[in-house]
Image (spheres, helix red, strand yellow):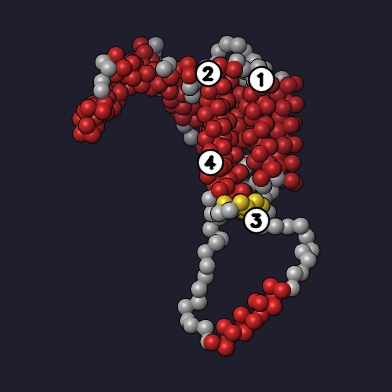
Amino acid sequence: MDILRSLPIGLYLEQPITWLHRLDPRIKLFGLLTFLLSPIQANEPWRIAIAVLLIILTLASQIPMRVWKQQMGILLLLAFMTLAIATFSPDGFNANIQPRRPIPEVNVTAEKALSASLLTIKLPQPTPYSYVVWKAGSITITRRSLDLGVRVCTLIFTYLYAPTLFLLVTAPEEITAAIASIFAPLKFLKVPVVEIVLTLTLALRFVPLVLEEVQNLGRAMRTRSINWKRLGFKRTTQIWLILAERLIDNLFIRAEQTASAMQVRGFTTPNTHIVVWNPLKFLPRDIILLVLLVAMWGLRIWYGNEF
């Protein structure tokens, strides 16, 4: 299986160029922070709305289905499995608390009589509220378990898919240019912004190389047709350790080649080599999207609070 084609995690989609590609990277970075920070201490409708908005944004951007179908399907399956497990599990409020000291016999008799009298009297409920949402036999779904399931499944989908979509439509150079533009005032505090941004650029460029090395090692193992069942635990562990050592050696070789290429091109330090990023300029569509994001934060503060 081709990892780079089936699960393009951290890769940039060069073609086709959608309207998400044309947005200013600073706006996309602010949008990513909105998707990641707004679900914190938010209520259930807001978390569900954020996850649904990510799906609608993917469909509206006209990104080819082959790019996001498998990874979105895996994340949705993981989210729904987490929802089912958390919903049908006990919520932790069913534990019976017993007193440490024995209760006198008179009090026990009085409590039994009081409970029997309460059972015969059925008081009407003032509101339709019910802590138990659904019950069938030994399976009980309460409001707490349902809230926990929705919270976990939406956070898993949002926190894993939002960065993937952001990296899919934003080039690494645009990300670094946006970060350099946002943190440019820190230069007056003698913060090495250029060095940090350059390190981030190299890290983003190194992610596809890591996936490529893993893919090459996987193909090499498949061509040898190793029977893992007959090797045993000890020999299987030794082979995996050898593969991990080989992977680290290959990554160090790639890093050394990258450093050599930078030195050949005359790059020594940011002070002697001017790092030219992509020019950033706000367009009318970027301003409209910025206003929508600010309105989204206002709606989050006004409506989406949990308490």
Three-letter code for the amino acid on which mark 1 is drawn: Ser
Q: Do callouts 2 and 3 mark residues in contact (Cβ within 8 Å)?
A: no
Where does residue 250 sit, x and y in percent of width and height?
A: 30, 20
Where does residue 97 sit, x and y in percent of width and height?
A: 52, 70
Of 62 and 14, the residue lying toward us: 62
| Residue designated by label 4 | 82
Q: Is residue 296 above or below residue 242?
A: below
Task: Please tell me in which quadrant of the rendered image residue 261 appears.
Answer: top left
Dot in front, 4 or 1:
4
Q: Earlier in the sequence, mark 3 or mark 4?
A: 4
Dot in front, 3 or 1:
3
Three-letter code for the amino acid on which mark 3 is drawn: Val
Dot 4: few (<14), some (14–19), or many (≥20) neighbours within 10 Å?
some
Secondary structure of the residue carrying tag 2 is loop
Three-letter code for the amino acid on which mark 2 is drawn: Tyr
Dot 3: few (<14), some (14–19), or many (≥20) neighbours within 10 Å?
few
Where does residue 234 sit, x and y in percent of width and height?
A: 20, 34
Q: Distance of mark 1 from mark 2, alpha carbons?
A: 15 Å
Q: Earlier in the sequence, mark 4 or mark 1?
A: 1
| Residue designated by label 2 | 12
Secondary structure of the residue carrying tag 1 is loop
Task: Give the residue at x 36% y 21%.
Answer: 214
| Residue designated by label 1 | 61
Three-letter code for the amino acid on which mark 4 is drawn: Thr
Secondary structure of the residue carrying tag 3 is strand
Q: Do callouts 1 and 2 mark residues in contact (Cβ within 8 Å)?
A: no
Dot in front, 2 or 4:
4
Secondary structure of the residue carrying tag 4 is helix
| Residue designated by label 3 | 132
